[in-house]
Image (spheres, rainbow, N blue to C red):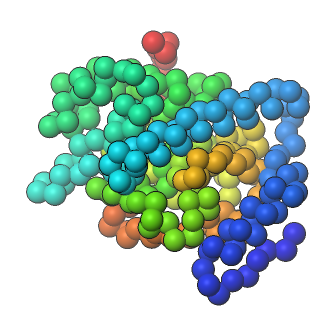
Amino acid sequence: MQHAESTSGGYDQGRAVLRFKYHHPAGCIAHTGHSTSTRSRSQVNFKKTLKQLGLAFRNYHETHRCLPPGGTIRDDDNVAMHGWLIMLLPFCEASPTFNMVDFHVPWDHTKNQEHFEQARRRWMIPGVDANYTNTGFALTHYLGNPNLLHRNSSVTFEQMENGTEHTWVVGEVAGNFQPWGYPFNWRPLGSKLCDGPDSFGCPPCHGGHLLFADGSVLFFSDETAPKILEMFAAMQPHATKEQTAVPNKKFVTSGFEKKKIR
């Protein structure tokens, strides 16, 4: 495979990457130990979940003229309030939860705790055992692009200079899962999938899916060349380190008696 070299930015590089995938699908689809039928069913389910998220993002953007904030952080005292998934909830399902959340207090306040203890199957990868933290908060297995979803962000499609079809929004993560209500649900893409708990990807599938801003969902093998992922990570817009900064916090998601998903 030859990678495109461009001095005009990531747009030409991204086009080259996607051209390669469509014409050489084996270059991005991993050959795993799963049967072909099992692998295909899993990928269909994962793609369906991300496509639904993609539609929710587009509907949110149509309503608010921007993507949801990655996390709402109070300016006066830097208190983390709420994350992008709760903002997206009304665009994903008909649920009373959004209207029951008290947005004047943080997500983990006692007034809100019961709402964020409710698991959302659509934001979990089937077969992954980690569904809750040891304190009872329900998890998400999907995290966002920090250049689009970060502290008090309001990114628009127009800011995606390389095109929505080349700008990734959300992907499956391999581990170190976080509560779906957490106000810091974003993570750098990195240069390799399924490369430990801080990476993106679904290890049993030997790769992972990424949702792009145009609503498309693509699967990339864990053997995808680092340069390809680096191209997507470099797409405009670029957030600052201050905007994407997250607390040094890991949630305990194993080693305790697990409760069933309600």
Residue 34 placed where, x, y %? 85, 31
From this view, report whether residue 262 is shown above or below residue 94: above
Q: Residue at x 37, y 70 (%)?
A: 240
From this view, report whether residue 152 is shown above or below residue 174: below
Task: Find residue 146 and report its image quarter.
Answer: bottom left
In the picture as drawn, the residue positioned furthest to the left comes out as 76
In the displayed structure image, the side of residue 228 where residue 151 appears, left or right: left
Please tell me which residue lies in front, 144 or 249.
144
Q: Is residue 200 visible?
A: no
From this view, report whether residue 28 is shown above or below residue 175: below
Task: Find residue 44 and report its image quarter.
Answer: top right
Please tell me which residue lies in front, 66 or 185.
66
Q: Residue at x 80, y 32 (%)?
A: 40
Task: Find residue 43 and report its image quarter.
Answer: top right
Residue 249 placed where, x, y %? 38, 47
Q: Residue at x 11, y 57 (%)?
A: 76
In the displayed structure image, the side of residue 103 where residue 151 appears, left or right: right
Q: Residue at x 69, y 73 (%)?
A: 13
Q: How many marks?
A: 0
